[in-house]
Amino acid sequence: MTTKSAAAAARSTVYGYPRQGQGRELKKAVEGYWKGRVDADGLRAAAAALRTANWRALADAGIDEVPTGDFSYYDHVLDTTVMVGAIPERHRAAVAADALDGYFAMARGNREVAPLEMTKWFDTNYHYLVPELGPGTVFTADSGKQVAELKEALALGLTARPVLVGPVTYLLLAKPAPGVPADFQPLTLLDRLLPVYAEVLADLRAAGAEWVQLDEPALVQDRTPAELNAAARAYRDLGALTARPKLLAASYFDRLGEALPVLAKAPVEGLALDFTGSAAANLGDLAAAGGLPGKRLVAGVVNGRNIWVNDLEKSLATLGTLLGLADRVDVAASCSLLHVPLDAAAETDVDPEILGWLSFARQKTGEIVTLARGLGRGTPAISGELAANRAVLASRAASPVTRDPAVRARTGAVTAADARRSAPYGERTVAQRTRLGLPLLPTTTIGSFPQTGELRTARADLRSGRIDTAGYEERVRSEIQEVIAFQEKTGVDVLVHGEPERNDMVQYFAEQLTGYLATRHGWVQSYGTRYVRPPVLVGDVSRPAPMTVRWTSYAQSLTGKPVKGMLTGPVTMLAWSFVRDDQPLGETARQVALALRDEVNDLEAAGTRVIQVDEPALRETLPLRTADRAGYLAWATEAFRLTTSGVAADTQIHTHMCYAEFGDVVEAIDDLDADVISLEAARSHMQIAGELAVHGYPREAGPGVWDIHSPRVPSADEAAGLLRTGLKAIPAERLWVNPDCGLKTRGWAETRASLENLVAAARTVRGELSSS
């Protein structure tokens, strides 16, 4: 039973919703605008229609309070940069000339200016645009987007709550602008930023906002006393404002820890907390802090980052405990639903039993509404839903789909020696240089080449039956021939086959491994208009047959230069999938590693001399709390070594990472024991090269000299300048020359020009080294 006050408190809400639409309408509209097929009014109309559809879907599902301001053409942190007027100097002319084009120039760059740096949003696969700030930054309020979207929702008759990135998190995510000393702390600008937030809050209140949510996920990370004091000051000052709406300070992705008392004592009207996974510790911490007397608590009890059906009875128990800790308890997902696909009901190809285990954004809103009703009216009001939920959970727990005794026996037999190369790096590098015969500053690419419209059409034609397998494979062969010929003509030293057969670097492998489920419509935003379909890990993993050997061997038959075998590493296979929650991640990683080990060994047996195992998610998956990191890095680095350690000393193992803050994992990068690592570095101006040098990284490295997420073609002089910077940290005999990342999203014209400039830059710097 629940009390009358509990019933009054039990409202349902979410912090954000998938932006793209069921058919990725936003992607099509934005890319149409970039290509000139859609004008600005058309883009705005498409966006407005998507917002309206999302709000109505939430309201129809029973959500009591919908979010506004979470919708974005590209990225919500970039939207915050616009809201506070922190436009970098190099972009101001473009923004002044046309606000929309200037916005996209900050996101993607253009022929004149480079974009903002892009990196991962905490430990997710979502990428945000990093604010660039300095001592001279002047903030000015621009609440137009936030006010307009609030008014749209209110005009539909909905109760709406604007959601903003909080001021402390915004500054903690920022970096010093180019030319600003690296030790500049953007948080020192807090007193300059708070009046701008005050103005935005006043504008939202005047537009009809009763509540505004300020997201502060940065506070779930380890924070210094000075940073916690800054947070306390920020919310003291915002809470003291008179012309403001009620404030809901929100955190998610982990436990708040020492920051929880700071927000609990702040003069704000509510707190939104995550109670899933490791953040379940917030429950005990909140009780220890004395609860939230007189305040609203929005309880994130439905996991907003994974796709498994919620355990409703467990969540109800948590909510029941929370009733005694706050004046009012509302029910929500743990974070924005941006991180999950839109609707599991669209997956008509999935086995009905397994489909019943899945919960995407629309299903999660249903769970939230059910839990709110059960909390407010008592469990008899949702007895039918509880019974159905118990049956689904029991079905999954008992299903033979989830367990393979042979896989478990193999993982149980792994020894420490299985995860170590047969020879130390010093011996391996001599053997590899003898076998490969590469020049100083060898050039290569990361793996993928442009996925042309013809390739995508051929893949769609194969799925629909318009062409047969033989016709499709002939198209793939033709593409590989073109990619190899171009690289040879350009002078690239270590070639790739271009991956024309691959739809996605994780999904391609998942579709060939047991234990994985691939979706047809499960799109999730990675950045901008880039959407991925993370596969679902439903059971134990093994590799029934070779996955890459055929096409790699074919490419190698076309050239005498080495062609890299290309695989996605075990940590990234987990990070960019929806992982099972019924066993430790390390156990799943070991299963995936052994499956990939079989592929690595088969590539080597087929004559492949260089094998790249990509691990861009190693940093992304790093726990947000320092105390949790050692255990993660132990199984993550072991999984990589287990994948790669079965090869001979003269087979060169590469790995690749991109678009993350690598300084925290340099030691782990070393522990991977790869022979060569390529890293994103162009947008961050070779920052990682210095970090590797400080660590004393002993192996070969290729910090990128071409930002492939921008349409800009870097000149040979620009690439050579970055190489010279890299050489200040990495000796020439250990420095590689490569782009930041794969070329899948680029067009052929940009690719040809940029790679020609990259090779020219390498030749120029080689000449400088030989003459010095």
Image (spheres, grey):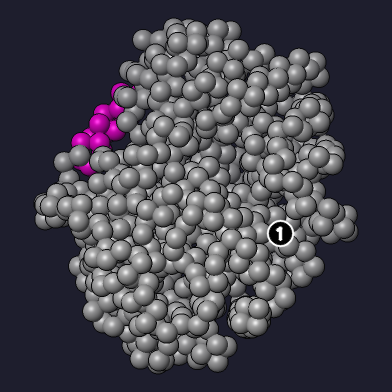
Residue 4 % position (x, y): 48, 7
What secondary structure characterizes most of the magenta part? helix
Residue in the picture at 52% in, 59% down: 658
Kind of residue indicated by mark 1 = Pro
Answer yes or no: is residue 144 visible.
no
Answer yes or no: is residue 692 visible.
yes
Residue in the picture at 61% in, 49% down: 128
Mark 1: few, some, or many residues within 10 Å (few <14, many ≥20)?
A: many
Residue 188 % position (x, y): 74, 32
Residue in the picture at 64% in, 36% down: 172
Give the magenta-colored segment's residue range. Answer: 381-396
Residue 706 included in the magenta stretch of the image: no
Front one among 701 and 44: 701
Residue in the picture at 55% in, 22% down: 259
Residue that badge 1 annotates? 115
Tell me if 38 is positioned left or right of 467 in this view.
right
Tell me if 620 is positioned left or right of 90 in this view.
left
